[in-house]
Image: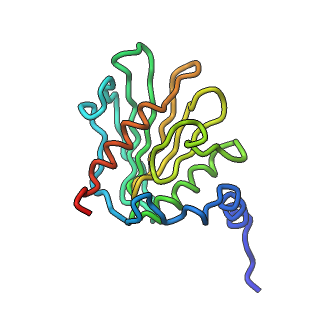
Amino acid sequence: MMEINNEDAYRDRVKANYEFSSWAGRTKEGASFQVSNFATRSQDLEGWTQEQSEELPATNRQRRVVRYVFNSTDKRGQRLIVTVFECNSVEDAHESLIDVVMTYMAPSLPRCETRGLEIGDICFGSHGEVNLNVIFARFNILVEVKSATPGPTSVDEFARSLDSIIYSQYPKTR
């Protein structure tokens, strides 16, 4: 009999809690389109400047992982930490999403659509009045956006902008 280790059992519980089987490997377009060499640039994100970027170690599910820090040019002191995971496939992006939500302290995060934020193929926000962090997958890209600003600062508009940039790479001729 094969022994299941605690990490695998925990991962299975997290997947069940997030209803993984209902969205795993699926995109809203029904296609497994691949985005390559995705990078966020300040000129694409009106009202934001990139303060720094750092390549992080990728796992076997990912080609590249980059963490960015953005500052608002409109709202003094507003900063965001954005991690972009370019994954090998839609399935790998969804498995990577599970990897990330497993690091959160909350037993589960609400679906973004229930909080008025309809982005990505799958998206989870935070608890509280505003989304202080959002994690979403669109095609093979996984994005985590976190507020690094004191106080309740929503990340929704920034996440919408990033999702729009990712989605704009999808060929409209399909």
Q: Quadrant of the C terminus?
A: bottom left
Q: Is residue 28 above or below residue 70?
A: below
- Nearer to us in this view, 46 or 148: 46
Q: Position of residue 69 (x, y in %)?
A: 40, 31
Residue 100 vs 112, above or below: the answer is below
Residue at the far bottom in the pictured view: 1
Question: Does residue 106 appear left or right of residue 63 in this picture?
Answer: right
Q: How many marks?
A: 0
Q: Is residue 93 above or below residue 156?
A: below
- Name the quadrant containing residue 24: bottom right
Quarter of the image that includes the N terminus: bottom right
Name the residue at 53% across, 61% down.
95
Give the image quarter of residue 163: top left
Residue drawn 37% across the image and 65% down it: 31
Q: Position of residue 64 (x, y in %)?
A: 36, 55
Most extreme residue toward the front is 173
Most foreground residue, 2 or 21: 21
Colouring rule applied to residues:
rainbow
Residue under the image location 69 percent in, 63 percent down: 7
Say which residue appears at 25% left-offset and 57% top-offset.
171
Image coords of residue 108 (percent x, y): 69, 47
x and y percentages locating residue 147 in the rendered image: 51, 29
Image quadrant where residue 116 sits = top right
